[in-house]
Each structure stands twice: as C-alpha cells, then as structure tokens.
Image: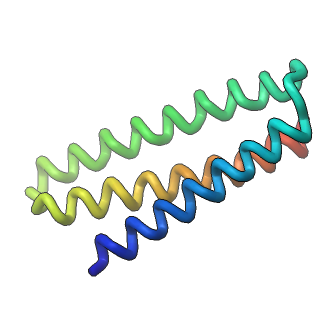
Amino acid sequence: MASIILSIMFLLASLINVLYLLYFTKKEGGDERSLMIMGRLGVNMFSLLMGGVAILFITNNLFGFSFEIFKQALLGLLCIVNVLYVLNLNRLRKQY
C-alpha cells in the first residue's frame, strides 16, 4: 500500500516538475541566463541524486533492507529530488 502511495507521489512530483520546466522554458526562452540556470541546476540535482543513492546503498549494506523497503526509499529519494528541482529552479530564476 505504501509503495502505491509513493508511486503516486512520485508521479505527481514528476508531473509538476515537467510542467514547471515547460513553463520556464517557454517564458524565459533559450537565452544565456536560462542556459546557465539549467546547467547549474542539472549539476546540483545530479550530485544530490548520486549522493542520496550512495547513502542508500551504504545504509542497505549496513542494515540489510528488504527489496520492498529499498524500492520505497529509492522512490522517496526521487520524489525529494523532483521537489527540490522545482524549488531550486524557482530560486535560481529569481536570483539571476
């Protein structure tokens, strides 16, 4: 049951992420400022995602999670990264 709820949350977070990204690209266009924002945002979110996955694998090796718990933790990490992506995009858009 929790896996279904997390899947729906991930789907909603991804949908919000894509819609806001389309809005940003349409509004800001392809100028140098938007390319800089997207590049910086991509590097930051990739680093956050890879760090989270590394921490997840380390804790899995230490505590021996079941496959279901590991899937839920990975899905939760993806939800968090999607939400932070939108928040950071909004913050960087206002900053630059």
Quadrant where the N terminus sits is bottom left
Q: Nearer the viewer, residue 41 or 4?
A: 4
Residue 67 in percent (x, y) is at 13, 58
Residue 79 in percent (x, y) is at 48, 58
Left or right, 23 with reference to 28: left
22, above or below 69, in the image: above
Please tell me which residue is depicted at 36% across the width and 57% down the height of the picture. Answer: 75
Q: Report which quarter residue 83 is drawn in.
A: bottom right
Q: Nearer the viewer, residue 40 or 62?
A: 40
Question: In this view, which residue lies farthest toward the bottom?
Answer: 1
Residue 90 in percent (x, y) is at 79, 49
17, above or below 41, in the image: below
Count of numbered marks: 0
Left or right, 90 with reference to 52: right
In this picture the colour scheme is rainbow
Q: Report which quarter residue 49 is drawn in.
A: top left
Q: Nearer the viewer, residue 61 or 72?
A: 72
Left or right, 58 with reference to 10: left
92, above or below 16, in the image: above
Q: Report which quarter residue 6 is drawn in.
A: bottom left
Residue 44 in percent (x, y) is at 59, 34
Please tell me which residue is depicted at 85% across the width and 41% down the height of the picture. Answer: 93
Please tell me which residue is depicted at 49% across the width and 61% down the height of the picture. Answer: 11
Q: Nearer the viewer, residue 73 or 55?
A: 73
Please tell me which residue is depicted at 60% across the width and 57% down the height of the picture. Answer: 15
Left or right, 93 with reference to 83: right
